[in-house]
Image (cartoon, grey):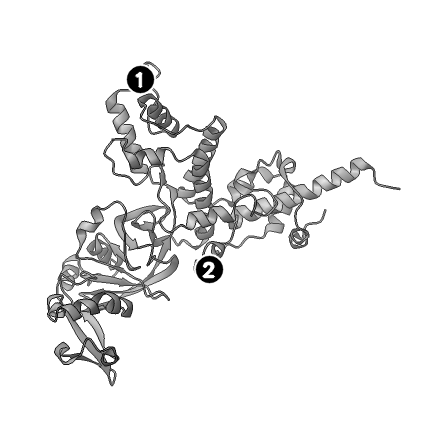
């Protein structure tokens, strides 16, 4: 007996619905794409998720609607983004906002929609003071100078379409899904686009400070590591690329340059470091420079400042102090050769050595200013994560946005665009009550991988 047309349609719908649910659960667990699709150097996601079991259990127990809350990362930053995503989609459904000119009423309208300005139902217009505070709040959420004036950069940020902000939120929700399983109860987090270092004890940060990160030409890598030791009053062993491109031309122009910069020439001989008189070297003859290294001696003008924090990694980057504290006043701090400069290194050292009572704050300060290098191992290695979030919810629940300083958001956006995405449900946007109405045929491999009986 032949299956009726209605049965065939029903079976086809049921199959597509199941595939869609598989894709939905996969994206909740792993994100819409893998991190190494954005950059091959990014840490791989380590989420452990039995998609087949989760889908089977949800279908059998009629708990499909609870999958999103069950599988979502418990990070406050993620949960805040999730709430903001729903609010921004409501704004989009209402038409978003038009590009802002200089109209005060238009400005107030956008700031109201974004939650930076409280509505004034009793008055036709807002006071100038209220509007200035709202602009300042918006600026603070976007990493802009909080002067309360709608200048060029503020207008540019206000004019970013709601659709682009929605994409930015979704992109960062993917990144939080990737890293959430790897975040230890205690760890250091350096958010590169946020130019911020935070030390976490549980869900909340116990220490925060500004950071300076790598330039576009010398980007700070995204990685996971473990802090193993500190070096007080460090030497700066100048990398060959910097020595060749930046220091050598100065030496060739000015023979006193090394002395003025507190630098010295060394070479390794029989496993010992030998200091060389720079006047004995022909700096203009490249063949004579082989085997020599440059380093800057410990002291207040040392490029690494008074302490560095080492977490061995393939990129040879680390955290360190800096003698140029004024650079932390800048809003955009992509200024280093890849390492991360920290605003309050003494506070970080005190925190990391708190379980080693012999290292009192006074002794730490003394070691930092001793001008004699001293390595101090940590009793227990301390996890550190260099991350790339351009949107997150802060500890007060405010939605924060930052510029895509290395272009990773753009790459992520291209990979998840509809024309490039897998032809299945799109995790942040699936309504499980309508899941079957928005699906297109999936690849046979997805069915084979699912392990689900139909």
Q: Is residue 264 left or right of residue 417?
A: left
Q: Is residue 185 visible?
A: yes
Q: Residue at x 36, y 55 (%)?
A: 386
Q: Is residue 46 visible?
A: no
Q: Which residue is mark 1?
A: 125
Mark with earlier residue (1, 2): 2
Which sits in the foreground, 226 or 116? 116
Whether residue 329 is situated above or below residue 222 in the rendered picture: above
Q: Is residue 24 left or right of residue 11?
A: left
Whether residue 270 is situated above or below residue 374 in the rendered picture: below
Q: Position of residue 209 (x, y in %)?
A: 25, 49
- Using the rendered view, name the quadrant where residue 351 is placed: bottom left
Which sits in the foreground, 325 or 392? 325
- Tell me, for residue 40, which label it has, or none: 2
- Tell me, for residue 403, which label it has, or none: none
- Quadrant of the rendering where the N terminus is positioned: top right
- Using the rendered view, name the quadrant where residue 319 is placed: bottom left
Whether residue 251 is situated above or below residue 320 in the rendered picture: below
Q: Is residue 178 left or right of residue 100?
A: right
- Label 1: which secondary element: loop
Q: Position of residue 62 (x, y in %)?
A: 63, 38
> Which residue is outermost to the right?
1
Q: Position of residue 334 (x, y in %)?
A: 29, 52
């Amino acid at each position: 007996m032949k299956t009726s047309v209605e049965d065939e349609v029903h079976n086809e719908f049921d199959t597509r619905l199941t595939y869609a649910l598989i894709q939905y659960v996969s994206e909740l667990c792993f994100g819409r794409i893998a991190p190494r699709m954005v950059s091959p150097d990014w840490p791989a996601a380590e989420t452990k998720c039995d998609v087949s079991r989760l889908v089977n259990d949800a279908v059998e127990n009629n708990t499909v609607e609870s999958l999103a809350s069950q599988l979502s990362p418990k990070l406050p930053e993620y949960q805040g983004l999730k709430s903001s995503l729903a609010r921004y989609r409501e704004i989009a459904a209402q038409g978003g906002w038009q590009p802002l000119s200089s109209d005060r009423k238009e400005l107030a309208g956008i700031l109201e929609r974004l939650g930076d300005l409280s509505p004034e139902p009793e008055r036709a217009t807002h006071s100038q003071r209220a509007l200035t505070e709202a602009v300042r709040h918006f600026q603070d959420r976007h990493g802009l100078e909080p002067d309360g004036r709608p200048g060029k950069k503020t207008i540019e940020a206000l004019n970013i379409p709601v659709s682009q902000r929605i994409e930015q939120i979704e992109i960062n929700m993917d990144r939080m899904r990737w890293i959430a399983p790897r975040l230890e109860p205690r760890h250091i987090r350096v958010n590169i686009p946020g130019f911020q270092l935070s030390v976490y004890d549980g869900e909340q940060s116990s220490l925060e400070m500004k950071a300076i990160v790598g330039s576009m030409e010398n980007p700070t890598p995204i990685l996971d590591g473990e802090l193993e030791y500190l070096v007080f009053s460090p030497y700066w062993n100048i990398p060959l690329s910097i020595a060749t491109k930046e220091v050598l031309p100065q030496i060739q122009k000015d023979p006193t340059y090394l002395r003025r910069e507190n630098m010295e020439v060394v070479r390794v001989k029989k496993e010992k470091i030998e200091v060389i008189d720079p006047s004995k070297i022909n700096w203009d003859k490249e063949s004579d420079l082989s085997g020599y290294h440059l380093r800057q001696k410990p002291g207040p003008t040392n490029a690494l400042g008074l302490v560095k924090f080492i977490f061995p990694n393939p990129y040879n980057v680390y955290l360190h102090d800096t003698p140029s504290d004024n650079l932390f006043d800048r809003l955009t701090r992509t200024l280093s050769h890849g390492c991360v400069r920290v605003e309050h290194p003494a506070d970080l050292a005190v925190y990391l050595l708190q379980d080693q009572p012999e290292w009192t704050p006074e002794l730490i300060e003394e070691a930092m200013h001793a001008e004699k290098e001293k390595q101090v191992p940590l009793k227990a290695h301390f996890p550190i994560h260099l991350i790339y979030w351009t949107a997150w919810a802060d500890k007060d629940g405010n939605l924060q946005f930052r510029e895509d300083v290395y272009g990773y958001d753009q790459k992520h956006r291209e990979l998840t665009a509809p024309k490039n995405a897998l032809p299945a449900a799109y995790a942040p946007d699936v309504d499980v009550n309508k899941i079957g109405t928005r699906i297109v045929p999936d690849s046979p491999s997805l069915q084979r991988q699912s392990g689900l009986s139909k």
